[in-house]
């Protein structure tokens, strides 16, 4: 038996439950202390490859050379620039004014309505469409990432034949040569191509009757729909609604950030948790989660229990049985295996709670669970009432599992019954489960035609790759989960001559009309169609939704006996040592489709905070048992590489110790280890290689240590702020402390940056979060000085004079109760503010540039911690410590309280970052935006040509040597002011809600509120006076403009 | 033996010092002036692809600036007219003039797609945001006023070839932002050239200016209120232009 390296932590935990960022943090590891002492993570400061001496040499040389080069241009005058007006100016387009268009993005899990902003004809920013029921104005990482994907420099410029450039004429000839009757032809598509796409697909099959259509998409709600069919009949679709729900159970699911309607569900969940007064607390949703991985939803749960994915079905069966004893008419099933003791207790308490919440319960089951388990959950939910409604899917009829369809296709390819394969924007060569060996079967196809926005693995292996237009470049239509249809309108002509989906399908059907717009009009605008009227068509384009297209919902009536029979047949496995369970989860990169988007790859994973890497996530106890370690190495981790093998397949991947993972599970994020793509290539390891089917769980996995280690890139402890002094300290005590460490010595975690309480605490004392805040005049920290009376304090900080502001004063409130930690704010901020990506090497140096970091803290014990999230950006302090230390006044306050940054003034001393207690300032150590010629490799210059089309012209693109940070989206504030002023209004009294920073705009739960704190009627003012309101580092008297509302947990007394 | 150095040589250190100071100061000023936008930018009058005369169009014929620069009140850029705007008249007027060949090439009987490559004259740096429309209507209600075209662009109506008239430097911007009153005019006089306010307007402008406090107005950075408390407006608004 190996010694448990976490033993000291475990014993410590029982005494001091607090918020910790990592095991090292909890353990008091020296590396964390070192990081906390510095404004940037260790090693960020020295520049790579260039010493100070080199820099001086270069500077000298460039000065003299520059002087010489300038000689021919005297007198000095900037380079000649041209103005190119239109020949005919388009109506309504005003140069320099962002235009917004409504469109939608079709997904297998239903469309999401979007508002896309364009500058001079370039789409630059995607936001949610408030009118759309699946968006409600919010967006997710997928939606945000699409705008960068549009400009991906690796999109093919012309059709590729066998990966080499060819021409459209040759390609068209190849398409024309498709067998007329469709013999041997198969078509692989995602679940939903939108009304027009599906119409054309049916036409394709009608025209070539022998052609077969297969569907495959790892992001689809496949098992959920199969389960719905089991429970409610073929073609049924289940709609969750948390509006009136009070108890939610999430089984191996991540419904808050993925799956159908997740933005709507997150909104409803967040709104229910944003309690204003103790009376609201009784109406809060109580969230229970049982899972093997640590999901975002799990981290938001009031009660979370770890259960292997392969045993999760049993938990639901046990729940059904328990509920039956409470008089709920659930299907008659019992657990086949013995659940762990804590899980049994959990099930009992949950059943009691659910039974008490009849008509107000909701159950969610993840895609890793088989259809029968979904059906069981639906049946239980139907018996309890509330939470779900049922509709009939647009394509009724029996459904077969996507993994089965892919298997059938693979077999058909192997047997040769399919010789021609047409793929519509899907990448099965990478996404197919490894055991299928799809790539080998794919190679056997005589002809394969891949249509895709990007060539990806499949396009390069296919006979033909034809560039497909992005949805931002195409006319089309999309259908939401609830049937709400939207028109998709292009914001830009297809780049590089790509063809829209409707055109491609029309061509495959051999139709004469191949215009995408005409095809969409055929669906909607022709005689007798809903949008035949010109006005209706224009309104649909404007609104982004077609009114009256939502399908009617009905109350669920489950086929209890059928469901029980199916649920009984589900195998449950109890994984254990040497028969581990391998669980694949979807991260930011989804099934790998977003892996070539650098925003996504540089976004830290919500729970592990891994960046540009994925790893086998293991629980601390498991790691200790197996002798696996992920040790701190500079700003990342030196992780032991392990080999996993199952069913004759093996993969090697680094292991990362993550608290909260089920001890018998090995968890891995999907979408990494791609082999094609300048960004995606060789980042992480493909988890899909080990999979046997579409479910994402493999049992009986063997794990062996390879003895190798690999560096993992993680921002877990980056920009960690030390615990805060709050005790009164005497000088004598202070002098005894080790240099540089007084903050740490003084009560780490005693006044956590993150504050939360239970509903009971909230009801007993609504202002619980302000406990221990420094009282007294303006919250100054007072030092007791020997020989001086307490009445003559020495202030540690700056002026104690009152500062009176007039007019509108901007401020922000982040409600930690409704923040779910989805990280969308960080990406939306990046898209809006031209924030560069720095790449893996630079993140390892601690130089990431995100203006918003979402701090994830664990609380509780090492094995079963809960976790919370806290977005931290510039706090816009009244007494901003960064301001007085700037030698050139590059960072100053403006009259409306913004701590502004004048980039062109900044000379890069980094004193401001050094003095910022929140560590929210970011420095451009290199020319990360690739504006100049220094440090930019040739291949990157080519990349930047298209990528820079995404940039927001209203925000300065920062160069090397410049400090930057959150500006409260000052460009949006100014835009609101200018447009108000233009219309004759008062720019100093904007209405509440006139300005929404990108983060607040994108937030699905509306956890971020921005506005005028000086206006007593504003929402932000109301929240600032909420008893849950508290400031970070309040004792420093920096008086941040951003404050937080403490989280309220809705715990069940039976489980605490 | 005669003295090698005459007596006046004693004064050389002093003379050298004065010379260095004057020469150095003069040199520094010369370089400063030479590199300042007053020298580098003011008077910049590049040759345009069409010899368009503002003097003729705006001056003699009295066309309103906004006929061509149509976006000036609605967006950040005033806009250069599309070929179609020129052709509104030039399909009838001077339709065969050899000077307008470039225009006709761009128009190509209404089928053209090639723009006319005008040379940009006025430009603020990329890190400084400028918005025309924000200057063409400031203040609220009765206190509404505007900055005229002439203030920044000079007497366009007298320019055969347009030249930059003002340095467009930050100091120059701040001069007006600190004291906007002299450059305010009524809304209906925005495009008027050579307009001067009368005494009553000047008084009104001073009153209006007090209500404005535009971004960058350093003079209002710190003021005392009636109670004698210090009101900090810090350096009122870098972020208006630098974002």
Image (cartoon, rainbow, N blue to C red):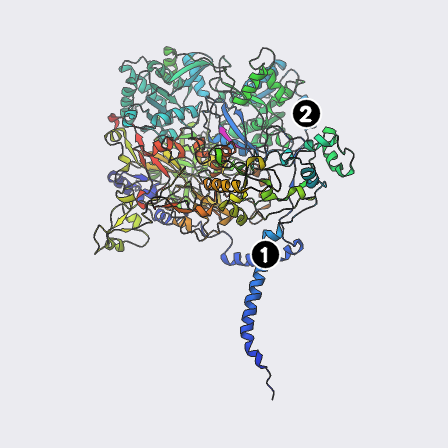
- A113 relative position to A526: left or right: left
Q: Position of residue A570 (x, y in %)?
A: 38, 19
User: In the structure shown, which secondary structural element does the residue marked by tag 2 occupy?
Assistant: helix
Q: Which residues are magenta?
A: A121-127
Q: Main secondary structure of the magenta part?
A: strand
Residue A171 shows up from this direction:
yes
In the image, residue B135 sits, relative to residue A924, either above or below, namely above
| A437 in relation to B123, above or below | above
Question: In front here: B54 or A142?
Answer: B54
**Could you tell me residue A666's position as x and y percent?**
39, 33
* Rendering quarter of residue B55: top right
Q: Nearer the viewer, residue A381 or B137?
A: B137
Q: Which residue is mark 2?
A: A172
The kind of secondary structure element at disc 1 is: helix
Q: Chain of mark 1?
A: B
On residue B188, which mark appears? none
Query: Which percent across, then down, holds residue A1044?
Result: 35, 36
Quick check: A312 above or below A901? above
- Chain of the residue that carries numbered disc 2 in the rendered image: A
The reply to whether label 2 and label 1 mark residues of one chain is: no
Is residue A393 within the magenta segment?
no
In the picture of the structure, the residue carrying the numbered disc 1 is B33
Q: State the separation of the CA atoms marked 2 and 1.
A: 65 Å
Badge 1 density bin: few <14, some 14–19, many ≥20, Cα 10 Å: few
Quadrant position of the N terminus of chain A in the picture: top left
């Amino acid at each position: 038996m190996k010694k448990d390296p976490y033993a000291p932590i475990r014993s410590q935990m029982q005494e001091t439950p607090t918020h910790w960022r990592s095991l090292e943090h909890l353990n008091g590891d020296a590396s964390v202390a070192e990081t906390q002492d510095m404004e940037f993570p260790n090693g960020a400061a020295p520049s790579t490859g260039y010493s100070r001496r080199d820099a001086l040499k270069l500077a000298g040389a460039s000065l003299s050379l520059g002087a010489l080069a300038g000689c021919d241009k005297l007198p000095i005058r900037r380079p000649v620039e041209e103005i190119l007006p239109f020949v005919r100016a388009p109506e309504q387009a005003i140069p320099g004014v962002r235009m917004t268009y409504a469109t939608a993005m079709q997904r297998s899990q239903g469309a999401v309505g979007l508002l896309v902003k364009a500058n001079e004809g370039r789409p630059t920013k995607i936001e949610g469409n408030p009118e759309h029921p699946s968006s409600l104005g919010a967006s997710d990482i997928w939606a945000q990432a699409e705008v960068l994907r549009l400009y991906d420099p690796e999109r093919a410029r012309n059709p590729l034949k066998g990966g080499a450039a060819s021409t459209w004429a040759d390609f068209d000839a190849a398409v024309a040569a498709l067998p007329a009757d469709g013999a041997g032809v198969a078509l692989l598509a995602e679940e939903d191509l939108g009304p027009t796409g599906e119409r054309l697909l049916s036409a394709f099959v009608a025209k070539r009757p022998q052609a077969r259509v297969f569907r495959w998409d790892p992001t689809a709600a496949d098992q959920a729909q199969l389960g719905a069919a089991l429970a409610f009949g073929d073609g049924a679709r289940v709609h969750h609604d948390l509006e009136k729900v009070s108890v939610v159970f999430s089984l191996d699911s991540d419904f808050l950030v993925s799956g159908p309607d997740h933005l709507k569900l997150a909104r409803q969940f967040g709104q229910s948790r944003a309690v204003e007064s103790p009376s609201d607390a009784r109406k809060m949703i109580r969230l229970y989660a049982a899972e093997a991985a640590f999901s975002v939803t799990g981290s938001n749960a009031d009660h979370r229990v770890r259960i292997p994915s392969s045993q999760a079905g049993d938990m639901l069966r046990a729940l059904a049985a328990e509920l039956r004893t409470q008089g709920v008419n659930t299907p008659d099933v019992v657990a086949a295996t013995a659940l762990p003791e804590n899980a049994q207790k959990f099930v009992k308490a949950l059943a009691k709670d659910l039974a008490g919440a009849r008509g107000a319960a909701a159950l969610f089951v993840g895609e890793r669970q088989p259809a029968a388990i979904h059906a069981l959950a639906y049946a239980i939910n139907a018996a309890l009432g509330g939470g779900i409604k049922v509709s009939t899917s647009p394509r009724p009829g029996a459904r077969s599992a996507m993994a089965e369809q892919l298997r059938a296709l693979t077999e058909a390819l192997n047997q040769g019954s399919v010789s021609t394969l047409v793929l519509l924007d899907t990448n099965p060569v990478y996404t197919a489960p490894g055991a299928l060996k799809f790539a080998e079967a794919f190679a056997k196809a005589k002809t394969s035609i891949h249509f895709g926005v990007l060539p990806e693995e499949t396009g390069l292996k296919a006979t033909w790759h034809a560039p497909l237009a992005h949805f931002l470049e195409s006319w089309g239509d999309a259908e939401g989960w609830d049937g709400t249809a939207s028109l998709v309108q292009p914001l830009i002509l297809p780049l590089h001559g790509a063809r829209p989906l409707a055109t491609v399908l029309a061509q495959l059907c051999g139709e004469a009309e191949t215009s995408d717009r005409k095809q969409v009009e055929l669906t909607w605008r022709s005689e007798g169609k809903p949008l035949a009227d010109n006005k209706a068509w224009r309104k649909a384009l404007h609104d982004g939704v077609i009114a009256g297209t939502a399908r009617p919902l009905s109350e669920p009536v489950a086929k209890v006996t059928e469901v029980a029979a199916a649920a009984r047949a589900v195998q449950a496995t109890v994984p254990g040592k040497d028969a581990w369970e391998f669980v694949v989860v979807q991260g930011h990169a989804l099934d790998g489709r977003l892996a070539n988007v650098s925003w996504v790859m540089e976004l830290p994973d919500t729970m592990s905070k891994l960046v540009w890497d994925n790893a086998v996530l293991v629980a601390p106890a498991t790691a200790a048992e197996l002798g696996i370690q992920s040790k701190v190495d500079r700003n990342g981790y030196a992780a032991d590489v392990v080999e996993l093998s199952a069913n004759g397949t093996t993969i090697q991947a680094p292991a990362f110790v993550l608290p909260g993972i089920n001890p018998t599970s090995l968890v891995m994020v999907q979408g990494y280890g791609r082999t094609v793509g300048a960004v995606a290539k060789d980042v992480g390891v493909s988890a899909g290689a080990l999979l046997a089917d579409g479910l994402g769980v493999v049992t009986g996995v063997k794990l062996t240590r390879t003895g190798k280690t690999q560096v993992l890139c993680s921002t877990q402890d980056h920009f960690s702020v030390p615990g805060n002094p709050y005790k009164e300290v005497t000088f004598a005590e202070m002098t005894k402390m080790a240099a540089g460490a007084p903050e740490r010595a003084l009560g780490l975690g005693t006044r956590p940056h993150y504050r939360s309480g239970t509903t009971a605490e909230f009801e007993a004392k609504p202002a619980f979060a302000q406990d221990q805040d420094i009282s007294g005049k303006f919250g100054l920290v007072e030092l007791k000085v020997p020989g001086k009376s307490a009445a003559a304090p020495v202030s540690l900080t700056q002026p104690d004079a009152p500062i009176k502001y007039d007019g509108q004063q901007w401020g922000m409130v982040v409600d930690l109760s409704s923040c779910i930690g989805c990280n969308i704010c960080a990406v939306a901020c990046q898209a809006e503010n031209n924030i560069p990506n720095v790449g893996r090497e630079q993140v390892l140096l601690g130089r990431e540039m995100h203006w918003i970091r979402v701090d994830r803290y664990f609380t509780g014990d090492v094995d079963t911690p809960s976790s919370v999230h806290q977005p931290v950006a510039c706090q816009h302090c009244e007494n901003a410590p960064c301001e007085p230390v700037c030698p050139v006044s590059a960072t100053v306050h403006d009259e409306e309280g913004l701590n502004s940054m004048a980039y062109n003034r900044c000379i890069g001393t980094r004193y401001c970052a050094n003095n910022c207690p929140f560590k929210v300032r970011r420095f451009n150590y290199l020319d990360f935006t690739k504006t100049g010629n220094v440090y930019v490799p040739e291949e990157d210059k080519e990349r930047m040509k298209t990528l820079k089309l995404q940039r927001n012209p209203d925000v300065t693109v920062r160069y090397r040597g410049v400090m930057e940070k959150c500006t409260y989206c000052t460009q949006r504030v100014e835009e609101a002011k200018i447009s108000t002023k233009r219309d004759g209004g008062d720019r100093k009294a904007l209405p509440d809600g006139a300005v929404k920073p990108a983060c607040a705009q994108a937030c699905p739960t509306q956890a971020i509120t921005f506005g005028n704190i000086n206006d007593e009627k504003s929402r932000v003012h109301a929240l600032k006076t909420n008893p849950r309101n508290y400031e970070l580092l309040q004792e420093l008297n920096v008086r941040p403009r951003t404050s937080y509302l403490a989280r309220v947990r809705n715990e069940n007394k039976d489980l605490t | 033996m005669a003295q090698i150095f005459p007596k006046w040589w004693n004064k050389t250190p002093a003379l050298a010092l004065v010379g260095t100071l004057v020469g150095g100061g003069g040199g520094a000023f010369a370089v400063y002036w030479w590199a300042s936008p007053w020298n580098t930018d003011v008077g910049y009058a590049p040759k345009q692809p069409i010899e368009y005369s503002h003097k003729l169009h705006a001056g003699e014929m009295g066309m309103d600036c906004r006929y061509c620069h149509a976006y000036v009140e609605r967006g950040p850029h005033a806009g250069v007219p599309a070929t179609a705007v020129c052709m509104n008249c030039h399909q009838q007027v001077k339709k065969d003039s050899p000077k307008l060949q470039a225009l006709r090439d761009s128009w190509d009987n209404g089928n053209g797609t090639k723009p006319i490559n005008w040379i940009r004259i006025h430009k603020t740096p990329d890190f400084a945001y400028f918005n025309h429309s924000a200057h063409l209507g400031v203040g609220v209600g009765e206190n509404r006023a505007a900055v005229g075209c002439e203030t920044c662009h000079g007497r366009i109506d007298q320019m055969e070839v347009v030249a930059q008239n003002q340095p467009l430097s930050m100091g120059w911007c701040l001069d007006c932002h600190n004291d906007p009153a002299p450059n305010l005019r009524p809304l209906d006089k925005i495009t008027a050239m050579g307009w001067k306010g009368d005494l009553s307007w000047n008084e009104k402008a001073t009153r209006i200016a007090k209500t404005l406090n535009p971004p960058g107005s350093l003079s209002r950075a710190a003021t005392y209120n009636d109670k004698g408390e210090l009101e900090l407006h810090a350096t009122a608004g870098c972020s208006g232009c630098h974002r």
